[in-house]
Amino acid sequence: MDTHATEPAEQQAATDSSAADDTPWLTAREQRLWRAHLEVSKLLEYQLSRELQPHNLAINDYEILVVLSESPQRRMRMTDLATATLQSKSRLSHQITRMESAGLVLRQECPGDRRGLYAHLTDQGWETLRKVAPDHVRSVRAHFVDLFDHDQIDAMYEALAPIAEHLRGLRGRG
Amino acid sequence: MDTHATEPAEQQAATDSSAADDTPWLTAREQRLWRAHLEVSKLLEYQLSRELQPHNLAINDYEILVVLSESPQRRMRMTDLATATLQSKSRLSHQITRMESAGLVLRQECPGDRRGLYAHLTDQGWETLRKVAPDHVRSVRAHFVDLFDHDQIDAMYEALAPIAEHLRGLRGRG
């Protein structure tokens, strides 16, 4: 696994002999946290994806099903869905095409609304979500939630919430 | 943003009237942590990617540069590189092709080793990493590390490390 925000090894050797490097390299403690975060993010996505495979769902598909299921009338404008799932419009469009073939969603124009297409959750999409959600929540418990003790659940949330807020703010301005 | 591991809304209504649902749905506290983790993972990757764009690097490219720079002789067997970066071989192959066009890496057979191709970091790849790393570490600080206080840095690490280990173990068996 990589370290990502440490000083490149030979750069370190080179800059040790100069006073010009004002880069705020991570300390060892910061680095091990950063590395753990990257590993958990990546490995968890991998593991949850793997456990969705028997259901013929990619993890992004599952996310789309959840987002649509929680939207009024189980539908969302494609541009809003792209924002909600942090995807580019073109990538979302490909994904929705796949999910349409699988019968999970339907793309439709909204009568009287010229601002583009909506993605609708189909009944089959809803049933799929109902069927898959119990397995998925067991995966989330087994590989994440249940590995924290009670205090950690709250402490982690309190540490992460301001970061999520900070990043949402940046994204909004983007 | 979605909730991912909560009970689908109408399913909840349906199962409230039956005793048959033994799904261990997340509690409100667990759910807000899970949701914060997903948001931070996704938004952070998005933000770091955006800040690498002026350098014409995708975040996966940066990771490849780091991994190769830390490998003996700045090279790695393609299959090992796929494992290290948690990518499929075919996806890595596409990425290396792009990076090869940009002059950052070189794909070569290893003399006397029939087990396949190596990816080598080129001098240009190394110089790119040297040039980009200071900006990248500033991004990692601004959007993650510096948003924790000192105690949180260690507490977060201690919470995440066992999860990373658990997931690495699963991956190894995969």
Image (cartoon, coloured by chain):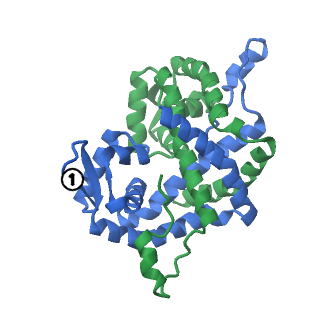
Chain colours: A blue, B green
Left or right: where B135 falls relative to A83:
right
- Residue positioned most to the front: A112
Left or right: where A153 falls relative to A68:
right
Instruction: Decide which of B25, B105 is in the foreground and name it.
Output: B25
Left or right: where A92 falls relative to B105:
left
Instruction: Decide which of B18, B78 is in the foreground and name it.
Output: B18
Left or right: where A49 falls relative to A37:
left
Does the rendering let one see residue B160? no
Instruction: Decide which of A164, B141 is in the foreground and name it.
Output: A164
The residue under the point 48% across, 60% down is B4
The residue under the point 38% across, 63% down is A69
Image x and y of residue A1, in percent: 61, 42
Compared with A73, A25 (above or below) is above
Instruction: Decide which of B46, B55 is in the foreground and name it.
Output: B46
- Circle 1 marks a residue in which chain? A
- Residue positioned most to the right: B151
Quadrant of the rendered structure where residue B91 is?
Answer: top left
Image x and y of residue A109, in percent: 20, 50
Q: Which residue is mark 1?
A: A108
Compared with B167, B135 (above or below) is above
Mark 1 residue type: Gln
